[in-house]
Image (cartoon, helix red, strand yellow):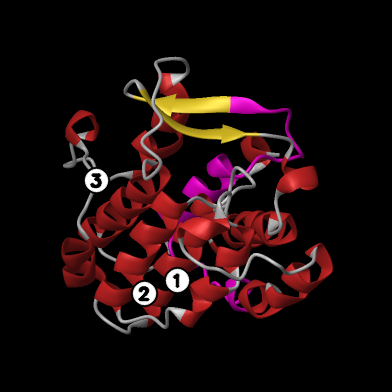
Amino acid sequence: MTIAVQSPYSSEQVAAWLRGLLTVAWADGNFDAQEQQSIASITKDELAPSIQWDSLEVITPEELAAMLGKGTPAAANFLRTAIMVAIADGTYSASEDQVLHQLCQALEQPETLLESLRHTLEHPEQITATNDLTKCQIDQALDPLRNWLDGLDIQDPRVARFLCKMIPAQCPFERDVTLFGRKIVHIPPMCKLNPLYEQLVGLRFRALSYLADECGEDVSAYI
């Protein structure tokens, strides 16, 4: 039996949260018209009934900060999920870095969180000259970010459901995911390419546990 859970977030805040994640996902600007329904099915049911999904648009950093607050736990938790979305395809682009940089500033979150991630840029010369690190050094540099991401506190069933749908149950074959004719992300086999794959898997497990243990929901559809 489903248990009524008191979320610390309003429906408007959750809608802004998901708009923020879509803003990060669309940062690359690479669009095509192949699998529009995939992400639509991920997010449609999680929005408040009063929100019109078909008119859902990207959100500015200032709008997001106005909804989630600056320097708040909600802002930090949003940024954790935003970084997960940015790295979901196993690569980190300059356009994604620019969007996350703006979000860090608006939400008053430490931009040092992005420094290690910049070592994994597709084209590091676009932002930083530190392109001479070995794979082992880059992996070690990512450890503080991994620890921070593992601190994500899931407190809302709508966000938890989004994460369970967004993160595959097992290492997937490569695929393109598009929404409204816009290619959101190309996902290669995640376990081979994604430096934060273990964080994604751990986050999905915590989201499943939250829905099952705290909300009393049947999570078999996500397994």
Marks 2/1 in contact by CB < 8 Å: the verdict is yes
- Kind of residue indicated by mark 1: Asn
Question: What numbered label is drawn on residue 58?
Answer: 3
Q: Position of residue 3 (x, y in %)?
A: 49, 58
Residue 3 can be seen, yes or no: no
Residue identifier under label 2: 74
Q: Nearer the viewer, mark 2 or mark 3?
A: 3
Which is more foreground, mark 3 or mark 1? 3
Question: Can you identify the residue that label 1 sits on?
Answer: 77
Front residue of this view, candidates 120 and 38 = 120
* Measured Cα–Cα span from mark 2 to mark 1: 5 Å
In this rendering, the answer to whether 181 lies above or below 99 is: above
Residue projecting furthest to the top:
34
Where does residue 13 sit, x and y in percent of width and height? 25, 62
With 151 as the anchor, is 41 left or right in this view? left
Helix, strand or loop status at disc 3:
loop
**Which residue is rendered at x = 25% and y = 56% of the image?**
16
User: Which of the two labelled residues, at mark 2 and mark 3, occupies the earlier sequence position?
Assistant: 3
Residue span colored magenta? 148-175
Q: Quadrant of the C terminus?
A: top right
Distance from the alpha carbon under mark 3 to that under mark 1: 19 Å
- Whether residue 210 appears in magenta in the rendering, the answer is no
Disc 2 residue type?
Answer: Ala
